[in-house]
Image: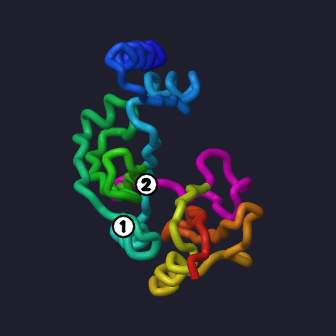
Amino acid sequence: MKNSIAVLTLLLATSGLTVLLTNSSTDAEEKMVVEFSRGTIDFGIVCSDVDKSVVFYKDVVGMKEIDGFDVPASLAADAGLVDNHDLHVHVLVTQGSSNATRLKLMQIKEAPGRKVDHAFIHSSLGMSYSTIWVSDIDASLTRAAAGNVKPIAKGPVALPNGMFLAVIRDPDGNLVELVGPKRK
């Protein structure tokens, strides 16, 4: 990237044009672009009732469902994901961008999983919560209330940076942080 800026600057200088070029990215950021093909991480959640979870993440959280996909049992087993079960994966996104975070929800009725202790983030090892950044915490909590979902504890709580944090639970008890400003 730095070499291409130098060449472009030289070409512009020899043509008599003056252009100010800035490069605010660091070497670490440039390397990250090479290391990862997307700037987000997708999350998969195995649900006890995928239909309830899809409704929760759409109607309560405000995500949008896009085309899901099927994974044949043989492929899922060969990858080490399941022990020979077909998967249908519902995909939800936070934005319409191709680089949006994707939440992948699935249910394996023939092999229901065990419930994890989600009392607090330290109750079990592994993924403990997800954070979803919202543009208006009050609007998000109004939508949640319409779905009969209330923040746990004293939420929303003020953060030092002027943002607010509310924690809710999805139908399987997974902790979901909603973080954003108050727009009112």
Q: Residue at x 60, y 64 (%)?
A: 179
Say whether residue 181 is left or right of residue 57. Answer: right
What amino acid type should be assigned to the residue bearing mark 1? Answer: Val
State the residue in front, 27 or 170.
Answer: 27
Q: Residue at x 60, y 56 (%)?
A: 129
Tell me where residue 33 appears, x and y as whole percent: 45, 28
Name the residue tied to disc 1: 54
Q: Residue at x 72, y 73 (%)?
A: 157
Tell me where residue 36 appears, x and y as whole percent: 44, 29
Name the residue tied to disc 2: 46
State the residue in front, 176 or 16.
Answer: 16
Q: Is residue 116 above or below residue 49?
A: above
Tell me where residue 164 appears, x and y as whole percent: 66, 69
* Labels 2 and 1: the sequence-earlier one: 2
Measure how far apart labels 2 and 1 are at the Cα level.
Answer: 12 Å
Say whether residue 14 is left or right of residue 148. Answer: left
SS at mark 2 in the image = strand
Farthest front residue?
Answer: 16
SS at mark 1 in the image = helix
Quadrant placement of the N terminus: top left
What amino acid type should be assigned to the residue bearing mark 2? Answer: Val
- Rendered image quadrant of residue 167: bottom right
Residue range (magenta): 108-128
